[in-house]
Image: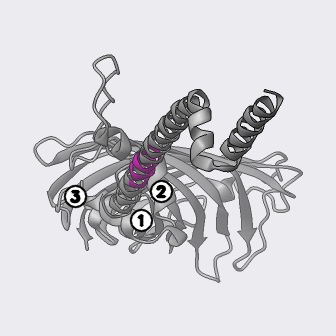
Amino acid sequence: MGRSLILWILVLVSSVAWAQVDPSTKLLLQESRSNVGEESLEKSRYSRSKRRQQQNLTRSSQIDQNQDLRQEKTSVSQSNQSGVGGGSDPATKTVENKKPDSKSPTSPTEPDERPSDLEVIEELLPHKGHKATKKYFSNIDQDDERRNILDVSVSPMYFSIHSDSNYWFRDYSAYGPGMAFAARVWFSPFLGLKAEIKSSLSNDIVSSPSGNERIAADHLWVDIGFVFRRFSNSQKSSPILNYEILFRDYALKIPSDSTQRVNLNSSGIVLSVERKGEMENGRRNFLGFEISPKLNHLESAAAVDIQSGNDSETNGVGFWIGQEFQFSRKQVVFWKLKHAVEKNLFGGQANTADPETTISPSGVVVNQSRTFFQIGIKFGN
């Protein structure tokens, strides 16, 4: 009995030990645990596949975003190229590629207006080139006088000078025919250089208090300076406003053997403004005004040195009216009536006695008025 019990115990112990050594027996002994491991393995595989799907979705979204960015960059570069060639705005081009929003306001259209004269003047400067010039002239009629580079005018004239003074040597009158020549060179439609000459023809003045003797007297006016003009619009009939800054020189020349008269000279800056009205049926009216704030007035001797005083204060004003009849920008007929006044105020006493009063006056005053009537023709090119 005791031996048989011992044998059964040995058999059981050996079977248990063999089961632990044999892998198949071990799996059989641990069936419930293996089932749990298979379920956890399946769950891990499912979670890994889910992560891979999420990663793939993330990568595809990133690829789509990169494609969108590339398309936007391509549209911006194309809009920049079109902006350089056609003048369009890149921002406007990008907005046009997008779908319009019903709530977004419509972009305002740019007004098609001619640039102001000031802007055109700035663009016509040498460092700006000729693009602005071509753009400005594209809006101007082919027969517009703004296209002229050179204007030349010739006009016969009749003038009258009356010098009123309390000193006989400066009291006289002169009148007669004359000629006027003028030229303007235009650097741009708004800026030009002007030169004008007026000269008397076969003129004379009284040379004695009795009035029985007369001597030759030549009158000459020379103007040179800058002309600025402004147009109201781009039409051929546009009103025009001219501004002039001139240097004027007037001279009276008498024979060198004259003992009763003196040579005269007045020179200085003249500021003027002229308005030409709107052209109607080829006709245009104009009027102007000028002022000479300060002139330099000199008396020079002929046969006798005659001085009205020590020094003088001289200034003058003038105004004119006229009409132009334009056949084309190259041919214009005009008439002009001008009246100007110059005043000389001398200090001190005259150095020669007055032949009528036999007294040397002090504070000699001279008021000289001049009237010109011209009819001429202007050629443009």
Residue corresponding to mark 3? 144
Count of numbered marks: 3
Q: Is 344 or 213 nearer to us in this picture? A: 344
Q: Where is residue 237 in the image (x, y as percent from the top left)?
A: 21, 45
Q: Along the polypeptide, which appears first: circle 2 or circle 1?
A: 2
Q: Along the polypeptide, which appears first: circle 2 or circle 3?
A: 2
Q: Is 275 or 229 nearer to us in this picture? A: 229
Name the residue at the top extreme: 103
Q: Position of residue 176 (x, y in %)?
A: 37, 63
Q: What residue type is labelled 3?
A: Asp
Between circles 2 and 3, the one closer to the viewer is: 2
Image quarter (top left, top right, bottom left or bottom right) of the N terminus: top right
Magenta span dominant secondary structure: helix
| Residue drawn 44% across the image and 46% down it | 56
Residue corresponding to mark 2? 121
Q: Position of residue 268 (x, y in %)?
A: 67, 60
Residue corresponding to mark 1? 188
Distance between the Cα atoms at labels 2 and 1?
8 Å
Image quarter (top left, top right, bottom left or bottom right) of the C terminus: bottom left
Distance between the Cα atoms at labels 2 and 3?
18 Å
Kindly indicate the quadrant of the structure image that contains residue 159: bottom left
Q: Tag 1: Cα neighbours inside 10 Å, few (<14), some, or many (≥20)?
A: some
Q: Disc 2 vs disc 3: Cβ atoms closer than 8 Å?
A: no
* Residue 262 in sight: no
Q: Disc 2 vs disc 1: Cβ atoms closer than 8 Å?
A: yes
| Residue drawn 73% across the image and 43% down it | 14
Question: Start and end of the magenta stretch?
Answer: 61-70
Q: Is residue 15 magenta?
A: no
